Amino acid sequence: MHKMSDAIEIANLILSGFHRHYGLFRYNAQQAKTAFEAGRYAAIRELAKERIAFYDERIKETTDALMIKSESVAMNEGTWAEVKKAFIMLLTDHKQPELAESFFNSITTRILRRADYGGENLFVRPAVATDYLDSDPPSYRVYYPRSEGLQKCLTRMAIDFGRRP
């Protein structure tokens, strides 16, 4: 039988892999913005290639670390259901839970046998609602011209555009 502490350790390892990926991705995007503003288009292309490869590289790094861990923990459906529960708890106050869940799914599909893919082991729907996450500035804004009127929406868009970071 597996221990809950093993599940928590595995969930933390996966979330650490996601944080590494997301941090590197954001840093690369900031570099691309600077390159764009300076008109260095070859650098932008190179940064875009790197950014595309980041995800697969972080998945491989995290999966490799988990395979080392799996030598002491039986990686099966029962263990993974506990890992998913522990991972959900880690996402309670997370600012990018849906991206983290996608990362978790990518790891899961590399670790488990296809027969073990299921709702108890994969995120099929978001476990953490992002509708009410506060961020300043907001990560997105919504406009409804049919209910608010086109002129009002366009005015709000212009005002909001001026508020960008």
Image (cartoon, rainbow, N blue to C red):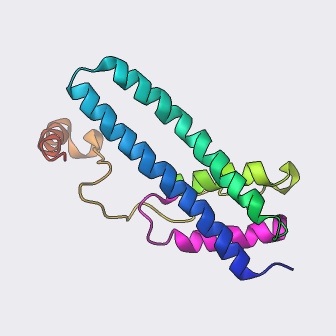
Q: In this view, does 6 lie above or below 50?
A: below
Q: Is residue 30 left or right of residue 131?
A: left
Quadrant (top left, top right, bottom left, bottom right) of the N terminus: bottom right
Magenta-drawn stretch, dominant element (helix, strand or loop): helix
Within the image, what quadrant is residue 121 found in?
Answer: bottom right
Residue 44, visible in the rendered structure: yes
Residue 126, visible in the rendered structure: no
Tell me, yes or no, whether the highlighted magenta stretch contains residue 144: no
Within the image, what quadrant is residue 145 found in?
Answer: top left
Between 81 and 56, the residue placed more toward the observer is: 56
Q: Write the residue at 32% across / 18% down.
A: 41
Between 122 and 8, the residue placed more toward the observer is: 8
Q: Write the residue at 29% across / 60% down.
A: 135
Between 71 and 127, the residue placed more toward the observer is: 71
Q: Position of residue 4 (x, y in %)?
A: 72, 81
Q: Write the residue at 27% across / 44% down.
A: 143
Segment tinted magenta in the rendering: 75-98
Q: Position of residue 62 (x, y in %)?
A: 64, 54
Q: In this view, does 158 lie to the left or right of 79?
A: left
Tell me, yes or no, whether the highlighted magenta stretch contains residue 80: yes
Q: In this view, does 146 lie to the left or right of 98?
A: left
